[in-house]
């Protein structure tokens, strides 16, 4: 558990509790459904069902949901961390990467944007990968996620075209951070 105060707001980054999975899934659906250029719930219903039921992913080994919590209970951001890439669940070649961790489904509440929550969650994932003594972190993003894309590049992630894939009609771009 890691705490940080930003603009008089105290946030804790920690693993989500099972009773927070529902709110976390709703937050992810809210965030992803508002992205310009991202498929809608009608276009990719299975994807949004996975978001809504994000807690199910934690049944896979070495898979955790990290949350940014305000006031002990309000989820302001979340991400799914995969300590073993075979459970990452994306298209492309990412699931065969060895000695690697990954994260997916980074989401920050629209009301909490600009506070650095996405960066805090990303750095928490990198820290977990280092603690596991892994040598790289794999992620994916889309053109609809320009804020996240720029943040990943500032942190040091490099484009890795070998990880790119198509999610139905949506191009998804791979990134890699050597640690």
Image (tube, rainbow, N blue to C red):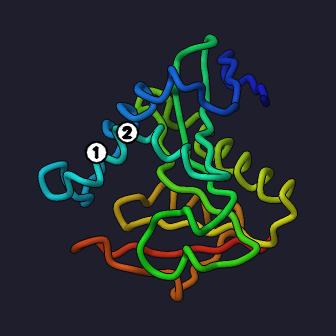
Question: Is 43 rendered above or below residue 108?
Answer: below
Residue 164: x and y, percent?
45, 81
Q: Is 137 left, or right, of 168 in this rendering?
A: right
- The kind of secondary structure element at disc 1 is helix
**Residue 86: % across, % down:** 58, 69
176 vs 156, nearest the viewer: 176
Q: Is residue 11 left or right of residue 29?
A: right
Work out whether 161 lies above or below 170. below
For label 2, the residue is 53
Return the x and y of residue 121 as percentages of the image width and height: 65, 43
Q: Quadrant of residue 33?
A: top left
Residue at x 61%, y 62% (from the top left corner): 152
What is the tally of numbered marks visible in this picture? 2
Residue 120 placement (x, y as % from top left): 68, 42
> Which image quadrant: the N terminus?
top right
Q: How dense is the environment of label 1, judged by Cα within 10 Å: few (below 14), some, or many (20 and up)?
A: few
Query: Which residue is rendered at x = 62% and y = 67% of the image?
Result: 85
Quote the CA–CA distance across marks 1 and 2: 6 Å
Is 30 left or right of 39, judged from the image as shown?
Answer: right
Residue at 47 percent across and 37 percent down: it is: 55
SS state under label 2: loop
The residue labelled by disc 1 is 49
Q: Which mark is residue 83?
A: none
Question: 63 or 81: which is nearer to us?
Answer: 63
Give the side of residue 75 with respect to residue 12, left or right: left
Outermost residue to the top: 71
- Residue at left 60%, top 37%? 117
Residue placed most toward the observer, 47 or 27 = 47
Position of 111 relative to 150 (above/below): above
Contact flag, marks 1 and 2 (Cβ < 8 Å): yes
């Amino acid at each position: 558990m890691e705490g940080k105060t930003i603009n008089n707001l105290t946030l804790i980054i920690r693993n989500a509790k099972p009773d927070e999975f529902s709110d976390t899934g709703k937050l992810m659906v809210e965030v992803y459904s508002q992205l310009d250029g991202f498929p809608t719930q009608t276009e990719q219903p299975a994807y949004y069902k996975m978001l809504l039921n994000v807690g199910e992913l934690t049944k896979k080994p070495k898979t955790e949901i990290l949350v940014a919590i305000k006031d002990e209970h309000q989820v302001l951001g979340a991400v799914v961390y995969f300590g073993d890439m075979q459970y990452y669940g994306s298209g492309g070649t990412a699931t065969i990467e060895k000695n690697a961790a990954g994260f997916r489904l980074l989401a920050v509440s629209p009301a909490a944007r600009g506070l650095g929550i996405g960066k805090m969650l990303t750095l928490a994932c990198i820290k977990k990968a280092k603690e596991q003594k892994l040598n790289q972190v794999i992620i994916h993003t889309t053109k609809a996620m320009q804020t996240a894309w720029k943040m990943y590049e500032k942190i040091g992630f490099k484009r890795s075209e070998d990880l790119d894939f198509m999610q139905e009609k949506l191009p998804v771009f791979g990134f890699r951070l050597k640690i």
